Image (cartoon, helix red, strand yellow):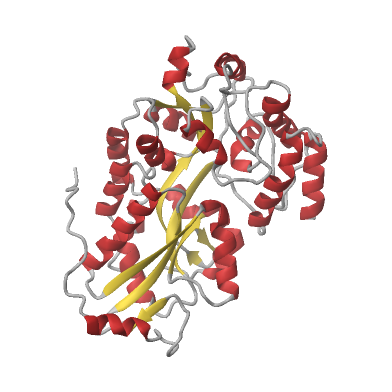
């Protein structure tokens, strides 16, 4: 167990050192490369760090890691900049266009085709700092292109079903075992839908419904790696998801505003008994709900359950004037002590393999190991195509029409496909 009374920062940040933060890194006064200060030779350097966060709890975790960088390297301070996940990659693209990228930025594996060009290869920056062999190979591969490793992973995990144990017990239902069938899922969802509460919550983002499609044999990318949302498997999966609202009545209609993290909010607020999410959300579940949390796999169709996975790392942007200092900072942010802290806080399933057993021990969710290990047996790597950020946005935008009964699922997917084409 790591010491929670971790000493933050170093007291020797003098006013003179702080004045150096106004000086441009390598580009002179007014540089917007994402770092300020003098760089090497012991001079003070301030590095901007951009990352997504959907709660103050998450912000606090990232700030803790930022403070650890200064404790390890007193000449480096970190300016944390957080954005809701829904807006994070749009903001990143806007900042790149304005030459205003932070020096260090989070990078999800599914976003590599979209924004990977904004990052520099790290292979020659990590010597003596990070042994990449200590990290889960699948997510390392997901963050690697032909040019090299773009980010060092800190977490990974399959999408699983989070459920409210208290609601299951109150309804007289057994907890859902990993590998449960779609028939068992629907029966439970109907039983749990009563008195203004719902059995399930979801929206139009592909993370929420692709497991229903993949489990029915769908392929959302064609042979050339381009999005294909009009093949029958995808239509069947999306139709099942939409039907949970429009036909089964076990999930609430989604808001037209596309509110960030809305399904998870419905679950956390006790308005829905189940939701699909990733292990990285356990920190929010543990600290923001007043009920017991359970995890299980997405339901199986004819004995098959295939979920998607995700994972994120931290990389150095291509406008950073202080890559050596940024590499040092990343080595702390994803280092063994930080990964143990991440595991302790439940922020994510650690990419650092030595910390994974510890994560299960401190997760305080007895069903977590069985659900995650079962899901990983058949998980789809969730590969994406260039332009996926736009694909994701289009699916969110047009899915509202399907979930609100204004268009059929097939019509909705055809419209999305035409926009993509």
What residue is drawn where x is 48% and y is 54%?
Answer: 141
Q: Position of residue 235 (x, y in %)?
A: 75, 35
Q: Position of residue 173 (x, y in %)?
A: 48, 11
Residue furthest to the bottom in view is 28
Res. 150 visible in picture:
yes
Residue furthest to the top in view is 172
Taking the image as shown, residue 80 lies to the left or right of residue 264, namely left
Q: Position of residue 194 (x, y in %)?
A: 58, 16
Res. 222 visible in picture:
no
Q: Position of residue 386 (x, y in %)?
A: 66, 59
Q: Is 148 placed above or below 309 here?
A: below
Q: Is 75 placed above or below 397 here?
A: below
The N terminus: image quadrant: top left
What residue is drawn where x is 19% and y is 47%?
Answer: 2
- Return the residue nearer the eye: 197 or 236: 197
Residue furthest to the front in view is 195
Taking the image as shown, residue 255 lies to the left or right of residue 348, namely right
For residue 152, what is the image quadrant? bottom left
- Return the residue nearer the eye: 245 or 110: 245
What residue is drawn where x is 47% and y is 23%?
Answer: 178
Q: Is 225 placed above or below 360 here?
A: below
């Amino acid at each position: 167990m790591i010491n929670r009374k971790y000493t933050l920062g170093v007291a020797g940040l003098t006013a003179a050192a702080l004045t150096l933060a106004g000086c441009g890194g390598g580009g002179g006064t007014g540089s917007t490369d994402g770092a300020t200060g003098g760089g090497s030779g012991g001079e003070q350097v301030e590095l901007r760090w951009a990352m997504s966060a959907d709660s103050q709890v998450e912000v606090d975790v990232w700030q803790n890691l930022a403070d650890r960088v200064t404790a390890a390297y007193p000449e480096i301070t970190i300016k944390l900049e957080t954005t809701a996940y829904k807006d994070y990659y749009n903001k990143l693209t806007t900042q790149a266009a304005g030459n205003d990228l932070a020096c260090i930025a989070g990078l999800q594996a599914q976003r590599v085709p979209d924004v990977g060009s904004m990052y520099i290869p790290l292979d020659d920056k990590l010597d003596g700092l990070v042994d990449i062999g200590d990290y889960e190979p699948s997510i390392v591969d997901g963050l690697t292109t032909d040019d090299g490793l773009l980010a060092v992973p800190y977490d990974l995990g399959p999408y699983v079903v989070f459920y409210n144990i208290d609601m299951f017990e109150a309804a007289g239902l057994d907890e859902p075992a990993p590998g449960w069938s779609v028939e068992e899922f629907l029966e439970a969802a109907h039983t749990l839908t009563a008195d203004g509460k719902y059995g399930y919550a979801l929206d139009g983002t592909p993370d929420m419904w692709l497991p229903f499609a993949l489990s029915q044999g769908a392929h959302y990318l064609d042979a050339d790696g381009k999005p294909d949302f009009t093949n029958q498997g995808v239509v069947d999966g999306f139709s099942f998801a939409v039907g949970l609202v429009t036909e089964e009545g076990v999930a609430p209609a989604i808001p037209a505003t596309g509110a960030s993290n809305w399904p998870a909010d419905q679950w956390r607020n006790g308005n829905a008994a189940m939701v699909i999410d990733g292990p990285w959300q356990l920190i929010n579940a543990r600290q923001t709900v007043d009920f017991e949390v359970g995890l299980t796999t997405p339901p199986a169709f004819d004995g098959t359950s295939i979920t998607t996975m995700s994972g994120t790392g931290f990389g150095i942007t291509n406008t950073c004037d202080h890559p050596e200092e940024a590499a040092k900072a990343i080595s702390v942010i994803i280092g063994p002590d930080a990964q143990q802290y991440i595991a302790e806080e439940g922020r994510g399933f650690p990419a650092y393999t030595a910390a994974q057993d510890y994560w299960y021990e401190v997760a305080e969710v007895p069903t977590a190991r069985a659900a995650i290990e079962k899901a990983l047996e058949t998980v789809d790597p969730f590969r994406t195509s260039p332009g996926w950020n736009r694909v994701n946005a289009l699916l969110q935008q047009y899915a509202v029409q399907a979930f609100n009964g204004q268009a059929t699922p097939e019509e909705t997917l055809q419209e999305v496909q035409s926009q993509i084409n």
